Image (cartoon, rainbow, N blue to C red):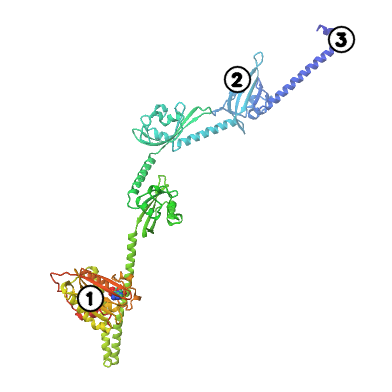
Amino acid sequence: MGNFENLSIEQRYKIIFDENQKLKKQNQKIEEQNTQLLDIIENLSEGVMFANNKGDFINVNQEAKRLIYKSDIGINIADAFKNIEVFDMFGNQVPYKDFPSVRALRGEKSKNVKIFVCHPNKEYYAEISSTPIYNANGDLTMIVSCFHDITETINQSKKIEEQKKELEAIIENIADSIAIFDDKGKYILVNRASRELFLASYKSLDNISDGYNPSEFYDAYGEKIDARNIPANRVMRGEEFKNMRMIVKSPSKTLQIDVNGTPIYDSNGKFILGVLCSRDMTDYFKHEEIIRGRYEFLNRMVNTFDLPVARLSYKDFKIVDINRKAFAIIELINSSVKSINQIKGCKIEDLFENFKKSEYYKCLDEVLKDKKIKYLNKKALTLNGNQVYFNIICEPVFEVNGKIREILILIIDVTPEIKSNIVMEKALKVQGEFLVNISHELKTPLNVIFATAQLFSMYCNSGSLDDKKDSIIKYIASIKQNSYRLSKIINNIVDLSKIEAGFYKLNLSNNNIVEIVEEIVVSLTNLTESKGLNIVFDTDLEENIIACDIEKIERIVLNLISNAIKFSDRGDEILVYVKNENKFVEISVKDNGIGIENEHLDMIFDRFRQVDKSLSRNAEGTGIGLSLVKSIVELHGGNIYVESEFGKGSKFTVRLPKEKVLYENMIYSSNVRGHDENIKIELSDVYS
Ligand code: ADP
């Protein structure tokens, strides 16, 4: 400085000026830095507030104003807090004296205090730290508070907390039992279902290492599961598994459960939690057991059934199983199948042509759709050249869950019923035809009788009875003739009914059959001559005594001769022959009339059956004569047969056994009508 005194005024002034300039610059720089700092503070995302030791604000940045103070420099904290309420995180109001900034004025430091700030219109969560600042002398000169908005974070954690609670409520109320334990094996969550299911079975549900006394675990096969392999320990080992079936036996009950186990790891791959999810399947298994039992029963039934049975899968209708009887049918339809095993697993459509277009496919499809049993009745099939009829039952077999597992097919052979129905229908038709026929046969003679009676009454009225005497005699003969015809029809119907009811009895006596037949032939000579026919009797033995009912034998022979006359032409010949055989006497009536077509030969002895009327020239008749003859012959222990060539003639042969009776029954052999009368009745068809 000594030097400074030696300097001139100008020099001195210059130095002072320079120094001044320097200081000014420095001041300016400090001023600039200060502004910069304030700028930075102003724009910080963190709220910052400075106040002097009296609590007057020195600086309050934007964020600090937004969150808390809304006030500017110079205002005192106490005024700034007038309209604000502050709460701690538990909802308790924080008194003014305990505000972190106010505490800082007292020299207390606070760090990261979470508060809830309520402005008249807005609310924030904020985290605040306040510090007192001292000068070199240790006097508190300032306080600074920093805070930031944690509203978003708090709201999020609140949301997470709510979701956690929701999740816990769901887990708590879920029907499956859920138990969660930590890496030490300590249960941290055991939901209600789990408590209800297991608490009665285990002493405690605190830690898996407590064991599950007094219960014991068994697997589905009844093998005891050792402690190492109980579900919780498997999860602890890091195993993940599904549907571990086990039986829990406790002194009070036995449960069948299904357990899923999952280990949960943290991001470093360390086991942190184990989750066990179990379900009480006791009832389900019981049902399953019942259904399995039924299923096995079904299996056995299929194979032992006497009915054809097949089991088809619901999908694609594949054969699951089939018994022998059903296989026998398939074998006849499709000759390429060789064995039951070969067709097991085959689709039905591969075994039967056009199956998918058939009503059988439609029926199976309906079973699946309607989940109901379906029937196909009276289905005709030709097997081995024979027409057979089946009733087919398609029944769905269900799983425990109500889904269709298979379709069971039962086949019932109804061929005998259907065939007997057909026979019955035919018989009814024939009977109907017979009635129509018989009423016609009854009406024809009746009409003649009525017409004649009318004629007679006309003659009476006109007084011409005497004049018409000749024709009246003819008409009387006609009345008689038609009465005979009526008698014959009625006799035949009555006798046939008697035979059917088993009331028709023979009055057997020992007679010379040759003589009986010859007498009949002789008595007919006049009639045959009048018709231009030649009737001849012949025999190889003059006397042949056998047990017979004379009246019935007459009916047999007259019936056969009557037919021979009916179906012969003028000039034809009828040969009646009695032949002695070893054990039989044969009576044959042979004509060379129209004959019978081969195809009709079988049916002419059938009841109510007449050979095609259009073929019979003389079509009078009811079609019961030969059937009656056959029955009477059979009552005698004999039989009758016919030989005929269409267009050439017929030969009827009756064979009667050569037997005799010890006690002849002549009492009822009352030939009440007389021999001639009988002939007239039996031959009423051919008399004119
Ligand atoms: P009907 O009362 O109609 O004559 P039958 O039972 O005596 O009934 O005869 C049955 C059918 O057998 C006749 O309708 C006829 O078609 C045939 N028939 C019977 N005998 C002869 C025969 N000798 N020649 C040709 N056809 C005959």
Q: Quadrant of the C terminus?
A: bottom left
Q: Secondary structure at mark 1?
A: strand
User: What residue type is disc 2 on?
Assistant: Lys
- First along the sequence among labels 1 and 3: 3
Q: Secondary structure at mark 2?
A: loop
Q: Is residue 19 left or right of residue 411?
A: right
- First along the sequence among labels 1 and 2: 2
Eye-nearest disc, 1 or 2:
1
State the residue at coordinates (47%, 27%).
183
- In this view, the residue in front, 286 or 455, is 455
Q: Is mark 2 within 8 Å of ligand 1?
A: no
Q: Which mark is residue 285?
A: none
Quarter of the image where one finds residue 459: bottom left
Q: Which mark is residue 109?
A: 2
Q: Is residue 623 visible?
A: no
Please name the residue that numbered disc 3 is placed on: 8
Q: Is residue 288 left or right of residue 9?
A: left
User: Vertically, is 455 above or below 327?
Assistant: below
Percent across and percent down for residue 396 are: 40, 50
Are the residues flagged by discs 1 and 3 in contact, CB closer than 8 Å? no
User: What residue type is disc 3 on?
Assistant: Ser
Percent across and percent down for residue 675 are: 19, 80
Please name the residue that numbered disc 1 is placed on: 577
Are the residues flagged by discs 1 and 2 in contact, CB closer than 8 Å? no
What's the distance in space between the residues labelled 2 and 3, CA to CA? 59 Å
**Callout 2: few (<14), some (14-19), or many (20+) C-alpha neighbours within 10 Å?**
some
- In this view, the residue in front, 645 or 480, is 645
Quarter of the image where one finds residue 583: bottom left
Q: Quadrant of the N terminus?
A: top right
Quarter of the rendered image showing ligand 1: bottom left
